[in-house]
Amino acid sequence: MFTKQFERRVYLALGVLVFAIALGGSFGVYVLWPSNREAGYEPKQPIPYSHKLHAGELKIDCLYCHAEAEKGPHATIPSVATCMKCHEQVQTKDKDGNLTEGTKTLLDHWEKKEPIVWNKVHDLADFVYFDHSRHMAADLTCQECHGPVETFEHMRREYGMKMSWCLDCHREELSEDDPARQRGLETRGPIHCTACHR
Ligand code: HEC
Ligand code: HEC
Ligand code: HEC
Ligand code: HEC
Ligand code: HEC
C-alpha cells in the first residue's frame, strides 16, 4: 500500500499534468485558430454582391452607399432600401429567364422587410478608437486603407489593420509647408497611445 504522503504527491503531479495539457491546448487553439484579423480575410456573404460591378463597371460612387464615412466614426453598410432604388426596376435573369439567386434573395428581403445580415469584413478590437470622418477630412481616399475595392468581386480585407499598420502611416513626417503643421502636427497622424486607446 502507498503511504498517504506518497498518494498526495501522485495527485499533485497528476493535477500539474492536467493543468499543463489544458494550458498548452488552449495556447495551441489560440495560435492555430483562423484569424479574421488577417489580410485576405474574405467571409462568405448572404448575397453575391459585387463591388467590381457596382463601384467598378457601373461607377456608383462609394459615398452613394457609404455616406456616413464623411459624417462620423462608421462608414456603415447601406440598407435594402438603397439597393431597391435601382433594383425595383433592374432585375437580373439567367439564360433560362429566371431571376438569379442573388436577385431573388434581395427581393425576398425587401418583400418581408427584413434587413440583410452581411458578415463583417473589418472589425477592430473594441479597445481601439477609429473615426472615418476624421480621415476623410484629411483627404484620404478609401483605397488607401481598403485597396482597389472597385476591382473586388467579393469584399475582402486588403490590409490586416494591426497597430503597426496605423502607425506606419501616422509616423510619416509632414513636409515643411503642409497645412496640418499649423495645427501643431509634425507627423501625418497622432502617435501617442491615448489617441487610439482612450
Ligand atoms: C451600391 C452600394 C455600394 C457601393 C456603391 C459601394 N459599396 Fe461598399 N459595400 C456595400 C455592401 C452592400 C457591403 C456589404 C457586403 C460586402 O461586404 O460585400 C459593402 C461593404 C464594404 C466594405 C467592407 C465592410 C466590412 O464589413 O468591413 C468596404 C471596406 C467597402 N464596402 C468599401 C467601399 C468602397 C471603397 C466603395 C467605392 C469604391 C464602395 N464600398 C462602394 C455596398 C456598396
Ligand atoms: C484611414 C483608413 C481608412 C480610410 C481612409 C477609410 N476606411 Fe473604412 N475602415 C477603416 C477601418 C480601420 C475600419 C474598421 C473599423 C472598425 O472595426 O471599427 C473600416 C471599416 C469600414 C467599413 C465597415 C463598417 C464600419 O464603418 O465599421 C466600411 C463599409 C468602410 N470602412 C468603408 C469605407 C469607405 C467607403 C471609405 C471611403 C469613403 C473608407 N472606408 C475610408 C479604415 C479606413
Ligand atoms: C445605382 C443602381 C444600383 C444600386 C443602388 C444597386 N444596384 Fe445592384 N445592380 C445594378 C445593375 C445595373 C446591375 C446589373 C444588372 C444586369 O446586368 O442584369 C446590378 C446587379 C446586381 C445583382 C445581380 C448580379 C447577378 O448576376 O445575379 C445583385 C445581386 C445586386 N445588383 C445586388 C445589389 C445590392 C445588394 C445592392 C444594395 C447594397 C445593389 N445591388 C444596389 C444597379 C444597382
Ligand atoms: C494612410 C494613412 C493613415 C492610416 C493607415 C491611418 N490613419 Fe489615422 N490619421 C491619418 C491622418 C492623415 C489623420 C489626421 C491628422 C490631422 O490632420 O488631424 C489621422 C488621424 C487619426 C486620429 C486622430 C483623429 C481623432 O479622431 O481624434 C486617430 C484616433 C486615428 N487617426 C486612428 C487611426 C487608427 C486606429 C488607424 C488604424 C486602424 C489609423 N488611424 C490608420 C492617417 C492615417
Ligand atoms: C494610430 C493608432 C494607435 C496608436 C497611436 C497606438 N495604438 Fe495600440 N493598437 C492599435 C490597433 C489598431 C491595435 C490592434 C487592434 C486589433 O488587433 O484589432 C492596437 C493594439 C494594441 C495592443 C494589444 C496588442 C496588439 O498588438 O494587438 C496594445 C497592448 C497596445 N495597442 C498598446 C499601445 C501603446 C502602449 C501605445 C503607445 C505607445 C499604442 N498602443 C499606440 C492602434 C494604435
Image (tube, grey):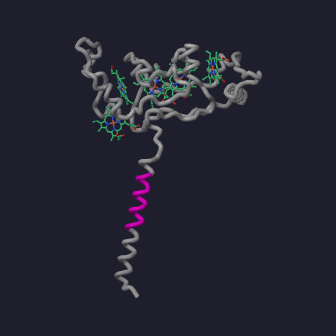
Could you tell me which quadrant the N terminus lies in? Answer: bottom left
Could you tell me which quadrant the C terminus lies in? Answer: top left
Using residue 192 as the reference point, say whether residue 138 is left or right of it: right
- Where is 10 relative to 33, above or below? below
Instruction: Specify the farthest residue to the left.
Output: 176
Using residue 36 as the reference point, say whether residue 197 is left or right of it: left
Of residues 166 and 133, the one drawn nearer to the viewer in this rendering: 166
Please report the residue visible at 47 percent of the width from the left and 21 percent of the height from the top.
Answer: 148
Q: Is residue 91 magenta?
A: no
Ligand number 5: quarter of image: top left
Of residues 193 and 162, the one drawn nearer to the viewer in this rendering: 162
Region in magenta? 16-28
Tell me residue 21's x, y (percent). Answer: 41, 61
Please report the residue visible at 68 percent of the width from the left and 19 percent of the height from the top.
Answer: 87
Please report the residue visible at 73 percent of the width from the left and 24 percent of the height from the top.
Answer: 99
Tell me residue 150's x, y (percent). Answer: 51, 19
Dividing the picture into quarters, in which one does residue 48 lie? top right
Q: Is residue 21 magenta?
A: yes
Magenta part, dominant SS: helix
Instruction: Specify the farthest residue to the right.
Output: 97
Instruction: Specify the farthest residue to the front.
Output: 95
Of residues 47 and 98, the one drawn nearer to the viewer in this rendering: 98
